[in-house]
Every structure is written in structure tokens, then in C-alpha cells.
Amino acid sequence: MLAWFSGPETFEMRFHQTVCVLALLATAYQPLLAQAEKTKSLPSGALSALASDEAAYCDQYLDEWKKSCHQTFRSNLRWHEVVITPSGQTAILVENHNLGSCGSAGCSLYLFLQQQDEKFIQILDKHGETGALDESERLKTLTNGHYDLQKTWRDGQTKTIYRWNGKRYGTGRISPLD
């Protein structure tokens, strides 16, 4: 310990080395920090599919609040991709945390599937569901070539299974024509 402070040249040299090491660490840390802050954004087609929800959310505001409501709406969406078929087809599960979209059963949930025309359609029941991303999972079982999905309710014990009916995921016997 005393060798570290043995003389002015040694102290200055150690100080310079310490500053250089700290600068090097800070430089190496910056890209990692930027990457962590940078998140993949929700595809624009999925945002378009949520346009009516966004409009309803923004209709409640006036003046200055209305100008920023679209950004606020979008910042309160949580989402992740879900592989829904063994071949790797994915859909986007969205949880809407905006005012009026959450209650005691959770928030509004939607599952969007991209079509060949690049548009996204909602395929979780007819109008979506209520729950949370972390309470939803893909099962290993298949129905009509699609993985079954499961939502665990807020009580932590009740579970709802969603099966593919040829057009969307549903909980009961839904005709493919629905």
C-alpha cells in the first residue's frame, strides 16, 4: 500500500494509469449500455391493428395532452413474439397497459398474426382477452397444427387453454367461420 504513494512520480503515474483504465472501461461499457436501452419496437402493422384502441385512448384528452397521447399510448404497450407453429410461424402477443385497458383481471391482451398482405389481424378469441404477458405461455401440445396457448389467471391457479380453430385461438368450440 505504501509503495503506491511512495513518491510524486509514482503517484502521478498510478493516477494516470487509473484514469486510463477507467476511460477504457467507460468506452467499452457505452455500446453495452446503448444496446440495453435500445429495444425492438412493435411492428407498424401491429400498431395499425391497435389503431382503434389508440384513437379511443386519445379521444379522452384535449389540447397539449392530445398531442402526446399517441406516444404515451405506444409506450404503455408490452409485447413479445410467440412461436405458434412447429415450423416457426410467429405471432405478436401485446399487453395494453394504458388507462382503461387494465382491471382486476389484468390488462387487454391481443395476439396479432401477420398476413401475406403485410397487415396484422388479431387472433386471440374474437376481440382479445384480459391478462398479462408473464401469465401466458405456449404449450407443447398442438391443435390443428398450432401450439396451444395457456393463460394463468391472477389467482395463480386457474388456467385457460386456447386452441387453434383454423382461423384464431379460442377457448371453446368456435366455428372456423366465426
Image: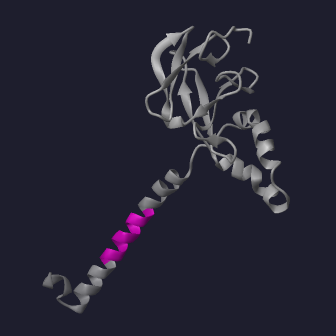
Is 60 drawn above or below residue 30 in the view shown?
above
Residue at x 58%, y 20% (from the top left corner): 89
Left or right, residue 16 beside residue 141? left
Left or right, residue 111 beside residue 161? right
Residue 53, quarter of picture: top right
In the image shown, does 97 or 8 lie closer to the viewer? 97
The secondary structure that dominates the magenta segment is helix
Q: Quadrant of the N terminus?
A: bottom left
In the image shown, does 13 or 111 lie closer to the viewer? 111
Furthest toward the bottom, the residue is: 8
Residue at x 71%, y 48% (from the top left corner): 73
**Would you say residue 104 sits in the magenta stretch?**
no
Residue at x 55%, y 20% (from the top left corner): 84
Residue at x 73%, y 33% (from the top left corner): 45
Residue 47, quarter of picture: top right
x then y, percent, for residue 35: 51, 51
x then y, percent, for residue 132: 55, 36
Look at the image and name its color scheme. Answer: one colour
x then y, percent, for residue 44: 72, 38
Please give the range of residues in magenta: 17-27
Residue 123, quarter of picture: top right
Is 43 drawn above or below residue 24 in the view shown?
above
Is 106 drawn above or below residue 71 in the view shown?
above
In the image shown, does 51 or 126 lie closer to the viewer? 126
